[in-house]
Amino acid sequence: MKNLARILALALCLCMMASCAFAASASTRIKDIAKIQGVRSNQLMGYGLVVGLDGTGDSDKMTQTVQSIGNMMKDFGVVIDTNGLKAKNIASVIVTATLPPFIREGDTIDITVSSIGDAKSLQGGTLLQTPLKAGNGNVYAVGMGAVSTGGFSAGRSGSSAQKNFPTVGTIPNGAIVENSVEDEGLGANGTLSLSLNKSDFTTANRIVQSINSQFGGIARAANPGRVDITVPAYYRKNIVGFVSNLEELSVTPDNIAKVVVNERTGTIVMGGNVAVDSIAITQGSLSIKIQKDIEVDQPPPFSMGSTVITDTTDTTVEESKGNSIVLPATSNVNDIVGALNAVGATPRDVISILQAIKAAGALHADLEII
């Protein structure tokens, strides 16, 4: 009776898994799987000084900090001897930021401030005016303001405590944009291009079909990663509205069959389009235990014998009964994993069996081990 209940439970589990595995892929918006080509951000970086630190700045060994202080003071008409300058209240930093698309002069962006010397903390410091340059060497923003670290470092007499990383901080809206990235205008020449987040022939073709069914034959897939679109004449003066309607169109993306396995946690994640040929699996375990003992033999009293020490080894071999599973060609990985779990296979056993199925050529999917 127990065996019958177990078989029925296993059958119900496999049916539920199979129905999930063969479910249709989720439909999503074009906006979530592609972007308008040319709409991109730019990285900015600059070198600056953080002042006002409570003795947690760079040491005198950081020559770049001392030189930077001297150069800054010269700009204000003050000439000082940098040999005797103490920089413990100042830290040299690298300032980074991201310039979003379509941002204009006068807008503000967030910046990140990171120590490049041996400063202990930037807490309470103020970043001096720092030009931020792009990869082409041009200045696009200028940053300045009070640094917020979100952490602290305190210590005295050999005892210390630290939270987060006090040598890295942020300044919300800390940089003012001075120059914008010029563009010719979105769709100015009457064309747009979509860049797929993940190149795929089928997905690109489905995007073309979805667009053409809504707007007519205006889309063409140039390659698996790009779809070229001709803007309809009645949308030429309303590019934003056209792109908004375009991004809301639904598409069912396609992906290659893949099984992702995490050996450290025993986690197995698979797609619903994974197929497996007819296979037979035997799962069992072999346990070998070797125990070594030392025996001491003492001679009888008043005899001429001597003490003898003997090493004895006891070997025990235990092998559990192997469980055999036969699955037809219509089975998928969900069926295999469910059946193996039912017969007591551990997650590591399941991972090893999946690797063996892939090596045998019966698993029609990419097996990725992370």
Image (cartoon, grey):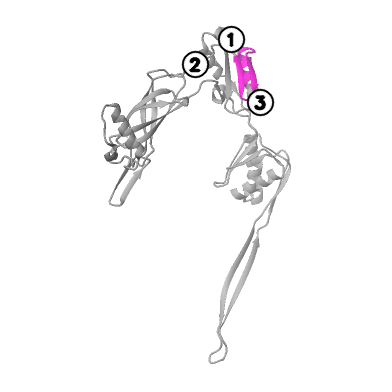
Q: Dot 2 lies on which element?
A: loop
Q: Is residue 54 visible?
A: no
> Looking at the image, is 319 positioned above or below residue 205?
below
Q: Nearer the viewer, residue 284 or 15?
A: 284
Nearest the viewer among 175 and 29 is 175
Q: Identify the residue at the far bottom of this view.
A: 302
Q: Determine the CA span between mark 3 and mark 2.
A: 32 Å
Residue drawn at point x = 30 percent, y = 41 percent? 56
Secondary structure of the residue carrying numbered label 3: helix
The residue segment tinted magenta is 207-229
Q: How far is disc 3 from disc 1 in space, using C-alphas?
A: 25 Å
Q: Residue at x 68, y 43 (%)?
A: 358
- What amino acid type should be assigned to the residue bearing mark 3? Thr
Residue 289 appears in view? yes
Q: Dot 1: few (<14), some (14–19), or many (≥20) neighbours within 10 Å?
A: some
Tag shown at residue 183? 2
Q: Is residue 166 above or below residue 232?
A: below
Is the C-beta separation of discs 3 and 1 under 8 Å? no
Give how far across and how far down residue 69 sits, in percent: 31, 33
Residue for badge 1: 232
Where residue 202 is drawn, which disc sits there? 3
- Say above or below: 291 vs 53: below
Element on which disc 1 rests: loop
